[in-house]
Image (tube, helix red, strand yellow):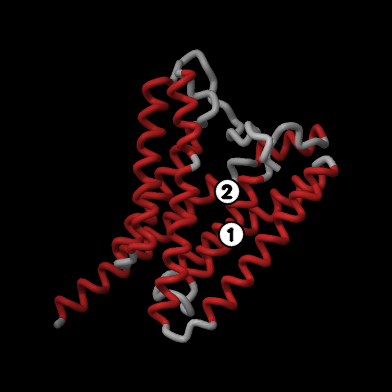
Amino acid sequence: MMVYLGSLQTLATCKDVAGIAGNVFAFGLFLSPVATFQRIIRNESTEQFSGLPYIYTLLNCLITAWYGLPVISSNNLLVTTVNSIGAIFQLVYITIFIKYAEKTKKLRMIGLLLSVFVLFAAIIVGSLLIVDFEIRHLTIGFLSCATLISMFASPLFVINLVIQTRSVEFMPFHLSLCTFLMSTSFLLYGIFNFDPFIYAPNGIGTILGVVQLLLFSYFKKPSREDSTEPLIVSYSSTDA
């Protein structure tokens, strides 16, 4: 019995360490758009940048933060803390984007932001109406997992661009490194907490992070400097 309790304590400690590390590494991702928004503020224009990534990341952070609360899942508060902080960062970025966007983009971004809040409120109310805790956990877990996987899949565009251009200009090393470290941390966190809704999507994020780092190592040219701006330029007429 003592050995069993000791093993549980060790797992809990490892889980907490991994979760705290994930929170720390996440700041690298949250701060990555700062250079872009410095440019937007400096030029007083959003130019051809898209606001959609911040809208989508906000929704993802809100849903995942909700999943981490005790009312939905057990022992996942570190998931809630990192995603709550992430949501605050996205709100700041969206506010700046709306302030400097032209009228059409501004109205569209406001509409999308309101839609996110309405959808998130519906998710909260709908989940609380589910009396059975396990069904509630599974429902929000699958939803959170789906949004996380789709978010981690977004670097596929950049990976494809790097392969086509044989250049890492639009794939900053620090962003790829933070993606790998954060995903790996929460992969371990989910494993130690026996939570597939955490380790499954972060396992995918870890693999994509490794691919990005390998591509960076392969295509990096010593004579070129890293790009300091993440690739969020709109390539589609559907972008905000």
Residue toward you, 29 or 59: 59
Residue at 49% x, 56% y is: 147
Tags 1 and 2 in contact by the CB under 8 Å rule?
Answer: yes
Most distant residue in the bottom direction: 131
Circle 1 residue:
85
85 on left or right of 163: right
**Which of the two labelled residues, at mark 1 and mark 2, occupies the earlier sequence position?**
2
- The number of callouts visible is 2
With respect to residue 84, does 216 lie above or below? above
> Which residue matches tag 2?
30
Check disc 1 and report its element: helix, strand or loop: helix
Mark 1: few, some, or many residues within 10 Å (few <14, many ≥20)? Answer: some
Label 2 residue SS: helix
Q: Judge left or right: residue 46 versus residue 218.
A: right
Amino acid bearing label 2: Phe
User: As shown in the figure, which amino acid type bears the numbered disc 1?
Assistant: Ile
Q: Quadrant of the C terminus?
A: top right
Image check: 184 left or right of 164?
left
Residue 22 position in % (x across, y down): 43, 55
Q: 70 or 19, which is in the foreground?
A: 70
- Residue 73, percent from left and from top: 42, 74
Q: Position of residue 3 (x, y in %)?
A: 14, 76
Q: Position of residue 28 (x, y in %)?
A: 53, 45
Q: Residue at x 50, y 48 (%)?
A: 151
Vertical comparison of 16 with 103: above or below: below
Residue for point 50% across, 32% down: 158
Vertical position of residue 217 compared to residue 142: above or below: above
